[in-house]
Every structure is written in C-alpha cells, then in structure tokens.
Image (tube, rainbow, N blue to C red):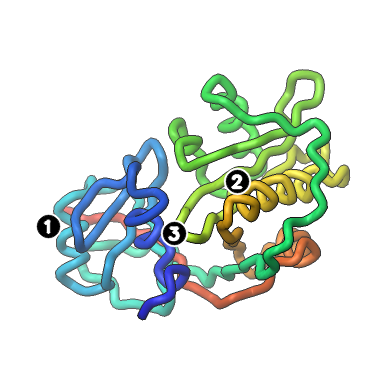
Amino acid sequence: MEHPLDNPIWHGLTTGNQHLALGNEQARYLPKAIGAFAGLREYSASAFASLHEMTLTGAPTVLFTATEIAIPEDWKVLVQKNLLQLVYQSPTPPTLDSTGIVALQPKDIPAMVALTAQTNPGPFLSRTIEFGEYHGIFETDELVAMAGERLQPTPYVELSAVCTHPAHLGQGYAARLLRHQMHRVLTTGRIPFLHVLPENTRARSVYERLGFQTRRQLQLYVLEKLAR
C-alpha cells in the first residue's frame, strides 16, 4: 500500500484538501488562484490525458512524485528538481513560545503576498490562505515573518510559506512560528512534515534543529500543458 507521503499532492487532494480540489478519480488539481498543484492516482498516460483535458493550456502545473517519471509529449517540462521531504517523528510537541504571533486573516493577504514575493518560499497567491491556518509576526504594522499549512494528506500536515523579511533575519522568528504550527498540528493528533530544496541548507538546518528528519527524496516537476 502506497504511503501517503510518497504521493503527497494526490493524497492531500483526496483527503485533507479535498474541499479545494477539482478533477476526477484519476487526476485532481487546484484552482489556479490557490496553487498550481496537481496529483495523479497513478502517473500513467491515461491519468495525464485526463489532467490535460481539465487544465488550462500554458498554465504551470506542479507535481511531486516519488521517483522520476515519463512525461507525455503534450506537456513541456519547465523544471525538474530533487526535493527533500522531512517529517517530525516525535509525538511530543516542541516548547511553545507564542510571543507576538497572530492568526492571519483574509485582510492580510496583500501583506502575505508582498512578503512571499520578497523572500520566495514558494508561490503564494490570492487564495493560498485557504489551504489552512497561517500565522505571522508584525513589527510596527508590517508583516515581517509568517508560516502556515499547505498539503494535508491525512494524517500529515505540510508546513509551508515559512519566511522572514530580510531586514528581520536572525531574530528567531521562523523557528518560533514553526514551533507554533507544529504544536497546533501535533495537539490535534496529526503529524507535521515539510519539503525543502537540497540546496537550501539554511532552511534545512533550522528544520533539523527543530526535530525534523529527512524521510526521502522526491521529484519536483513544473509542467506546462501544450495544445494538442
């Protein structure tokens, strides 16, 4: 039986994120204002054909796969990279420090989009906040750090959009926000996990100090649908 984290987008879009998903029993995807993620039950030609019929020509589509896969000719590969998947293995929540942390609301979306544009933790769009709970830290009414939830392949919850404004680095904001998110996830009986590019050694070291351990390497694909 496939582990849900070996195909995390598919399992997220069929369990914890299913209320956001479009598609069918072969392929599911998100509205583009939420994110570019798509997942296939099996990475077969028929599943790719089903996804091709449902999605927009020219729009990016992001896949996370357990291994390298064959991409059909009616898709263009824009990016293929290794991606590390880390999981917090302990059932014990980390020490909690909620100083200055506030729940982010729809009114904060412009500030969230601006912060992620400066720091590039991954795409953050006008409806990405719908993935789950996001929290942030403000300094003099400016959002300077944030973290939130993204894929939720039951019982796992991916922590994402972890970022700090360059002018406010070195103050421990990212670690504080991560502990806060981890505590929330663990106290509801779920398991935190996250993804990081291998070359992002700064972020990876923060995650490892917090107790995350590398589970496996995945493949990240960014595809563009071509007209037939």
The answer, for residue 100, to whether it is visible in the render is yes
User: What's under tag 3, amino acid-wise?
Assistant: Pro
Dot 3: element = loop
Mark-to-mark CA distance, 3 and 1? 33 Å
**Which of disc 1 and disc 3 is earlier in sequence?**
3
Q: Residue at x 21, y 69 (%)?
A: 73
Instruction: Name the residue nearer the viewer: 18 or 150.
Output: 18
Mark 2 surroundings: few (<14), some (14-19) or many (≥20) residues within 10 A: many
Dot 2: element = strand
Residue, disc 1:
228
Residue, disc 2:
161
| Image quadrant occupied by the C terminus | bottom left
Please state the horizontal and vertical placement of residue 119, each as a whole percent of the image.
66, 43
Residue, disc 3:
153
Dot 1: element = loop
Instruction: Name the residue nearer the viewer: 189 or 185.
Output: 189
Mark 3 surroundings: few (<14), some (14-19) or many (≥20) residues within 10 A: many
Mark-to-mark CA distance, 2 and 3? 17 Å
Q: Residue at x 51, y 49 (%)?
A: 150
Mark-to-mark CA distance, 1 and 2? 35 Å
| Image quadrant occupied by the N terminus | bottom left
User: What's under tag 1, amino acid-wise?
Assistant: Arg
Vertical arrangement, residue 25 with respect to residue 144, above or below: below
Label 2 with label 3: CB-CB less than 8 Å = no
Q: Residue at x 38, y 36 (%)?
A: 33
Vertical arrangement, residue 128 with respect to residue 170, above or below: above
27 on left or right of 174: left
